[in-house]
Amino acid sequence: MTGHRFTFSGAQLFACPSGALWWPDQQLLCVSDLHFGKADRYARKSRGLLPPYEVRETLTRLEEDIQTMNARQVICLGDSWDDLEAAERLPDDEKLWLTRLMAGRNWIWIEGNHDPGPIELAGTHRSELQVGPLTFRHIAEDAAVGEVSGHYHPKARLANRSQPVFLVDDTRLILPAYGTYTGGLRSTHPALSSLMGPEALAFVTGKTVHPIPMPR
């Protein structure tokens, strides 16, 4: 498979070009910040019109990752929905597509700050989840060890182009946003610089994934 292999808290993981995290020993795929329904929310809130295809594009990439890895577990690491109404207004064909992806898999929805809480879909809804040495939650906490989180949509600017990145140090791993219509916070922002240790790395996504020292 393509991606960057690394060890975090004793777990052998892959940072995938799509922004997904793959844990082969657990057959576990983790994605963060899908933000389904962002175009719908923008239209409802008169914030402008975005092409209404972001849910299908995100589902296409998610399906490809699930099939490529043959994932048996999927963790959606919070902010899977852009708001409550977006979850309620998901078109039937896209809801069916998502339901089909969930079938036969251990699917966990982690609560995020945008999420409406439990919705009328299958899967398990949790505030956080411990799997072996790793703890999955939406927003990083102080003094966390073996923590996998999202929320910040980290990016780094390289060669005049902003790219989503994974951020990792000895105790914490922050995933990039997986959803199509998601902005990002540069790794130089104080909120991220203060969270990550001095030896933190950024895994830059794209056609391949390559590690660099975290830009500060």
Image: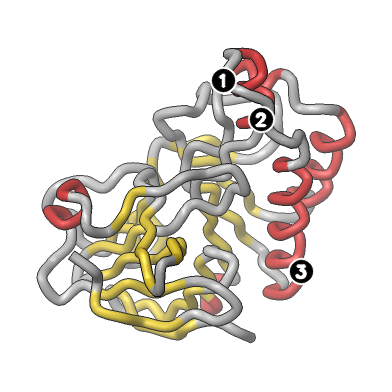
Label 2's element? helix
Q: Residue at x 78, y 51 (%)?
A: 101
Q: Residue at x 71, y 64 (%)?
A: 66
Label 3's element? helix
- The CA distance from mark 2 to mark 1 is 9 Å
Instruction: Where is residue 6? Give x, y as percent.
Output: 38, 83
Q: Nearer the viewer, residue 9 or 216?
A: 216
**Closer to viewer: mark 2 or mark 1:** 1
Q: Mark 2 or 1 closer to N-term?
A: 2
The residue under label 1 is 47
Instruction: Name the outermost residue toward the right.
Output: 93
- The CA distance from mark 3 to mark 1 is 35 Å
The residue under label 3 is 67
Kindly identify the amino acid type of the residue bearing the numbered disc 1. Arg
Q: Residue at x 55, y 23 (%)?
A: 83
Quadrant in the picture for the N terminus? bottom right
Q: Mark 3 or 1 closer to N-term?
A: 1
Q: Few, some or many C-alpha atoms within 10 Å of disc 1 (few <14, some 14-19, many ≥20)?
A: few
Residue 75, placed above or below residue 14: above
Contact? badges 3 and 2 (CB < 8 Å): no
**Closer to viewer: mark 3 or mark 2:** 2
Instruction: Where is residue 154? Give x, y as percent.
Output: 36, 55
Residue 87, placed above or below residue 79: above
The residue under label 2 is 39
Q: Is residue 136 visible?
A: no
Label 1's element? loop
Q: Residue at x 69, y 67 (%)?
A: 65
Residue 31, placed above or below residue 1: above
Q: Mark 3 or 2 closer to N-term?
A: 2
